[in-house]
Image: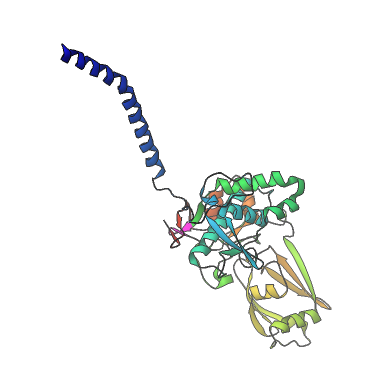
Amino acid sequence: MKIIIAFSVLMVIFIMLLPVFVVKGVHAEHDISIQAVETEPVLSPEVSSEPAAVSPNPAAPSRGVDTTTMVKLKTGDSVVTLTMYDYLVGVVAAEMPASFYEEALKAQAVAARTYTYYKMLNGSNHSDADVCDNCNCCKAYFSYEALREKWGEKYDYYIGIISKAVADTDGLCVTYEDEPILAAFHSSSPGYTENSESVWHSPLPYLVSVESPENGNTVPNFYTEVIVSFEEFKSTVKKSYPLAVFDTDQEGWISDAEYSDSGRIIKVRVGGVEMTGTELRGLFELRSTAVRWSVGNEYICFEVTGYGHGVGMSQYGANEFAKNGADFFDILSYYYRGTSVKSYLMLDSDKKLL
């Protein structure tokens, strides 16, 4: 009888504790399933070993690749560390009008991100930074403070547009053979973009000349003139090229111009000295190398089309494509031939992409 009573008591205790074991079992399975999801490899840049900065932009996403990857930016004599997100917002806002179509802004964000990764992985122009804020060296950049001053009461509206373009393309890069490309871009082209070797002497298979749809009706200052007096012309050239010789026949001061198929000067003789189109552009601060000239009674007039070096994505061309329904994938694959747009995982320790 005592055995039966003891057995009955044990059964009651077991029945009372059974729900506790069941609940603990369910919670354990739930924890395991969460860990399995979070530890699966993802195609996005790895969190930097440095602590993530707190973005001053309230529109910044709470999670994502661009808020954990850090960029060292040289600005003046200083180097500041920013999240990729904050850096790209400043770049896109400085490089492209916020009034552009959304898909063009997204294409700009991906191109700028890709260029930055390329510099991180292949060597920067600077020993102490990944990039700088000089558009003639790396890319233009505006801080949030500068943008607030620039946009005034429209700041919240415009910063929201730019922030969305960066966040919506989080971690995406343009790749060629699974590596980020040198994603060059420029403002506008005179009908065609330029081959990379015509500007930098190094051919890259994805930076080839393609037709671009912008024109004088869609681009401000698409056609410009620079008028230089004979005296100013001679002194400017001889300052950099002292061997240049100028006789009394001003018609012959510029000669033997060789143009690329895109209509830009590859090389030309000035005062008998051979120089590249890029060097001529730099001497007289021309907006591009798509240049023709005429000689007046006391001056030389340069007639210039487009703006920028002409290689890679045309920003105004991208906007025209977006206006006509192209998405940012279409735009990037058009201007960067043979490439793919992918998310990447960047390991800061050895600068490799997975």
Find residue 39 and report its horizontal and vertical position in percent: 39, 45
The N terminus, quarter of image: top left
Quadrant of the image occupied by residue 270? bottom right
Find residue 142 and report its horizontal and vertical position in percent: 67, 57
Magenta region's main secondary structure?
strand
Check residue 338 for magenta coloring.
no
Residue at image position (40%, 38%) is 34
Residue at far top of view? 1
Residue at image position (83%, 78%) is 298
- 349 relative to 290 in the view: left or right: left
Residue 266 visible in the displayed image:
yes
Residue at far right of view? 297
Residue 338 visible in the displayed image:
no
Tell which of 232 and 162 is nearer to you: 162
Find residue 178 and report its horizontal and vertical position in percent: 43, 58
Query: Number of callouts in the render?
Result: 0
Display colour scheme: rainbow
Quadrant of the image occupied by residue 37? top left
Tell which of 66 and 232 is nearer to you: 66
The C terminus, quarter of image: bottom left
Span shown in magenta: 175-179
Find residue 150 and report its horizontal and vertical position in percent: 74, 53
Vertical position of residue 74 compared to residue 277: above or below: above
Residue at far front of view? 2
Tell which of 248 and 12 is nearer to you: 12
- 61 relative to 349 in the view: left or right: right
